[in-house]
Image (tube, grey):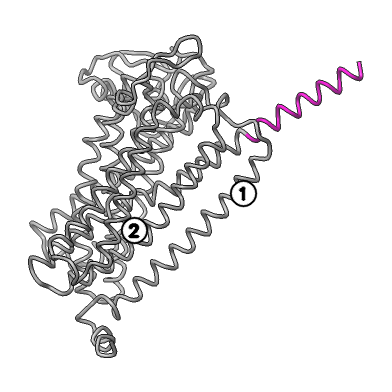
Amino acid sequence: MLYISNLCVNLLIQKLMIMDDFLAARAQMAMSLGFHIIFSCVGMVMPFLMAFAHWKYLKTNNEIYKGLTKAWSKGVAILFATGAVSGTMLSFELGLLWPQFMKHAGPIFGMPFSLEGTAFFIEAIAIGFFLYGWDRFNKWFHWFCGFLVGVSGLASGILVVAANAWMNSPAGFDYVNGQYSNIDPIKAMFNDAWFPQALHMTVAAFCATGFAVAGVHAYMILRKKNIEFHTKAFKIAAGFALIGAFGAPLSGDVAAKSVAERQPIKLAAMEAHFKTEKGAAFVIGGIPDEDKGEIKYAIKIPKVLSFLVSNDFNAEVKGLNDFPRDEWPPVIVVHFAFQIMIFFGVIMIIIGIIYLYAVFFKKEWLNKNWLLKTFLIATPFGYIALEAGWTVTEVGRQPWIIYGIMRTVDAVTPMPGIQYSFYFFTAVFVSLSFVIVFLLTRQIKMVPKLYDPTDPQFNAKQKKL
């Protein structure tokens, strides 16, 4: 009896240790992706702001735009290097933490990853040409190099999203008796989810980066620092932010309809929709109660959810109760993340409407501190919405790492001590964050000396040179 009791205790301890490692592996991926997605979005969008400022310089010959282009290009270089580090770490983590996933999935969706590597190398070459091509290349070829940085960065982000979309909508193979056969990497890459996810991600990146950059320059205007320089930068960034803010509802609608078709359980979790019904209501706020199968304190707009997913106010929407309980994602997490994304998305749309109204009808508002303070407060809103959206995407797919085929718990490494890896990678990413903040802060402080030709410090610096 004592032997059996000890055996049971040991098995229980072993099970708990495996669960600890499993949670540590998931936490490490969540932390790594949460950091990397910020760098990725900046890499996808910031080069286009830089290229636009450069184009303005070439068209107007205004030296402020030249300085702005150079300032932004240094920021692009800093964040490109950081994104390269965090992306490399993520690639190692996939093999380290999820070997079973990579063993089976790697041969199927390896193509977008290999193409992403090609896009990365093109981006690296183009940014090198741009940084060191001033007064060495033809002016329009030089501009094209900067534009190519944006195109390759955008392509890189879309290709990675295609790989993630495959996890949500696996395609390009036959799965029979636990074996993968008849692999078609093209079909795998262009799966049913890749376009909705890539579109929504791209639009969200423009929105998040645009608002973040506009907020930084709004802060400098409020401090009365190099006002003309930062005003031009603010206007460019705000324009890109508005493109993203107004495009987000459209791309979100495409993405939501795709989720409703492919992953109805994820949609049900997003809305905390427990009972299958026709004319389903769209839920705002509320606290889901998974045990009772209801949502409390929510505002319900009748029939709107049915219309959003199928353009029919009386369409049937499946509820969570139609699915096995062990296949439910964490409803509270998914629902709250979805509500956060919607909330900040709506706030940014409202800010965009106010800004457009000021541009066309109330130009005196453009010089008001309250408008600049609004953009300053909204600096992190896009990235909060972005992180919440990715939480919906990833947590909403649970318990699957490959939707409907492989569970996340079956893909994790059997290697013990993953929590120590989590601590190490967390320390690395936190250190990178401090380094980035320091470098970007220094860049902003150097505007008077290096980038704004209207500042006396700039002229003094040029005379010394």
* Residue at point 19%, 60% (across, down): 236
Which range is magenta? Answer: 1-21
Does residue 387 lie above or below 258 as drawn? below
From the viewer's perspective, is the residue at label 1 or at label 2 nearer?
1
Residue 5 at x, y percent in the picture: 86, 20
The answer to whether 148 is drawn above or below residue 118 in the figure is below
Mark 1: secondary structure: helix
Residue underneath mark 2: 377
Name the kind of residue labelled 1 in the image: Tyr
Q: In which quarter of the image is residue 446?
A: bottom left
Query: Label 1 belongs to which residue?
Result: 423
Q: For the residue marked with disc 2, what is the amino acid?
A: Ile
Q: In which quarter of the image is the N terminus?
A: top right
Residue nearest the viewer, comparing 167 with 309: 167
Give the side of residue 284 with respect to residue 195, left or right. Answer: right
Q: Which of 56 and 374 is in front in this view?
A: 56
Which residue is farthest right? 2
Where is residue 335? Give x, y as percent: 42, 32
